[in-house]
Image (cartoon, grey):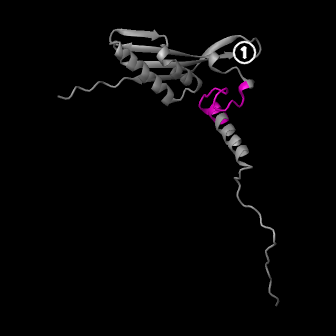
Amino acid sequence: MGKLAITRSARTYQTAVITPRTAPALLLAIVAICQIGLAKTADLTPWKGGGFGMFSTLDHNAYRRLEVVVEGTERSEALEIPPSLETDAARAAAFPAEWMLRSLAEGVTAREKRYRRSVSQVTITVWRTDFDRTTLRASERPLRVFTYTVPPESAPVH
């Protein structure tokens, strides 16, 4: 019986998948997959997070709006977004994740307390404008509704 000899060829192949040559394409693919996934599952507007799909839809901040309702002792009213919270509101409209909406609600709560107004609950509704494919008639639908219950203040420690 003869012995089987296994020889290596003189040519060696690079086994690394990520190289300076392939890294940009790989990064682009990862960003695209994440952005498309968030747009489909977490209501991220296709215009944000990488912009893949931005020209295929009108779903961007111009067609989204927030409604903020504050409830407190003998009080329930809709508020305009104050200039100090406009950036947070725009981010929450573009990506209405729970943590974004919570951050905005906490900002509204802090502002109301600064002005010594009663606040026990903040409800934020993110609205999206849709267009009928046949008639192009616009209609709004709620994308997300988030309710933040203000925690009770602790008593001062003496």
Identify the residue shown where x is 39% and y is 19%: 109
Identify the residue shown where x is 75% and y is 17%: 133
Q: Is residue 9 magenta?
A: no
Question: Would residue 12 appear left or right of 152 to someone viewing this image?
Answer: right
The answer to whether residue 120 shows anywhere in this view is: yes
The answer to whether residue 121 shows anywhere in this view is: no
Figure check: 75 above or below 19? above
Counting from the top left corner in percent of width and height, residue 151 is at 34, 25
Identify the residue shown where x is 65% and y is 32%: 40
Quadrant where the image shows the C terminus: top left
What amino acid does circle 1 point to? Asp
**Label 1 crowd bin: few (<14), some (14–19), many (20+), radius 10 Å:** few
Instruction: Choose between 104 and 151: the one closer to the eye.
Output: 104
Question: Would residue 85 appear left or right of 58 to someone viewing this image?
Answer: left
Q: What span is colored magenta in the figure?
A: 36-54
View extreme (left): residue? 158
- What kind of element bears circle 1? loop
Snapshot quadrant of residue 130:
top right
Quadrant where the image shows the N terminus: bottom right
| Residue identifier under label 1 | 132
Instruction: Choose between 92 and 136: the one closer to the eye.
Output: 92
View extreme (front): residue? 20
Figure check: 24 above or below 4? above
Counting from the top left corner in percent of width and height, residue 132 is at 72, 15
Counting from the top left corner in percent of width and height, residue 122 is at 42, 19
Q: Is residue 38 magenta?
A: yes
**Magenta span main SS:** loop
How many numbered discs, if any?
Answer: 1
Counting from the top left corner in percent of width and height, residue 117 is at 34, 12
